[in-house]
Amino acid sequence: MLILHSPLDMHVHLRQGDMLALVAPHTARDFAAAVVMPNLTPPVTSLPQVLAYREEILRVAGESFSPLMTLFFKSYSRAELLAARPHIIGLKLYPAGMTTNSEAGLADMRQAHETLAIMEELDIPLLIHGEGCGFVMDREAVFLPVVAEWARSFPRLRIVLEHVTTCAGVELLDRFDNLFATVTLHHLLITLDDVLGGLMRPHLFCKPVAKRPEDRDALRQAALHHPRAFFGSDTAPHPITAKEAPGCAAGIFSAPVALPALAGLFEELDALDLLQAFVSDRACATYGLTPMAREVRLERRAWTVPERFGSVVPYLAGQTLTWRVVD
């Protein structure tokens, strides 16, 4: 039996409407809290939208789960951010067009400085989809100099490089004490070869794309040992009609398998004793969180991941996992 205390998923996409009702219970079952992304249609850019979305999540997820809300990054006044601060965990910055529903994101990174200064003053963290324009395998590397500039210019601003995917991204953590990173399950397990090395596997297509084996190895070391790297699944459901289609949507729905698959990986790496820190303790230290007390128990018992949950194909569909969450 493996007991995890108040596990946290620091990066989830819960979507809207019927999709929210389908996927949110999976996250709420296994996690005490989760950081909810704001790239809806339209994006969440005001306090009333934050509060309304939070209530919508709680209606389907239940009161034993805490949605940690974010605002979609744009230019905000100090008054707007001061009013929002008690209700959000941070602002999420998307470079325009880099991922799903990011068309309203920032096109010119220089336009961020005024809002970043206010965030630093008010101690509101910045969460970044850290990719720039360029060859798809290099988009994180292209954006890292921007992250470094902001970390230098705003030394009291906590900056989280979301879903880090490269050796270079992990190495940047050691240059700045105010820089943190989330690491996904799928980037710990796959490389680009798993996606494209044989037949195209659309349900493994995500952004940022999976990278090279050496990048995956660096992420594993960060997950095991880096005090400023913690779990964020980036679970991102799309209906099968959007995944198995021309213009395949980017995103992997990992919520139903996140903790069992992580337990299997950490056991394989002889590091089960480090899983608690990765899925809770480091994030609590970073954000100053005291999540609601929950024990999530996993047992070593084989089970097969369903082929579908409603209209969505989950990560590792049809595969047998050795750990499962005890209901």
Image: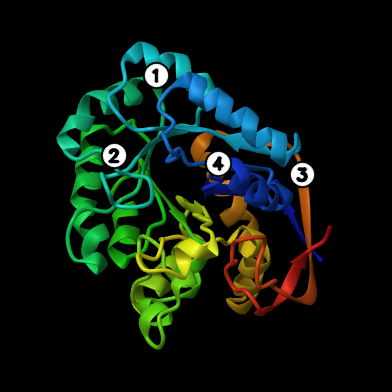
N-terminal of the two: label 2 or label 3?
2
Callouts 1 and 4 close, C-beta under 8 Å: no
Residue occupied by mark 1: 81
Whole-percent x, y for residue 308 in the image: 65, 68
Q: Pointer 3: residues within 10 angstroms few (<14), some, or many (20+)? A: some
The quadrant of the rendering that contains the C terminus is bottom right
Q: Nearer the viewer, mark 2 or mark 4?
A: 4
Residue beneath the point at 41% across and 86% down: 199
N-terminal of the two: label 4 or label 3?
4
N-terminal of the two: label 2 or label 4?
4
Residue occupied by mark 4: 16
- Say above or below: 57 vs 244: above
Q: CA distance from mark 1 to mark 3?
A: 31 Å
Q: Amino acid at mark 3?
A: Arg
Callouts 4 and 3 close, C-beta under 8 Å: no
Most distant residue in the bottom direction: 198
The quadrant of the rendering that contains the N terminus is bottom right
Q: CA distance from mark 1 to mark 4?
A: 24 Å
Residue occupied by mark 3: 294
Left/right placement of residue 134 relative to residue 323 reads left
Q: CA distance from mark 2 to mark 1?
A: 18 Å
SS class of the residue under badge 1?
Answer: helix
SS class of the residue under badge 4?
Answer: loop
Most distant residue in the top direction: 79
Callouts 1 and 3 close, C-beta under 8 Å: no
Residue closest to the eye, 61 or 278 = 61
Determine if residue 322 is in view. Answer: yes
Image disc number at residue 105: 2
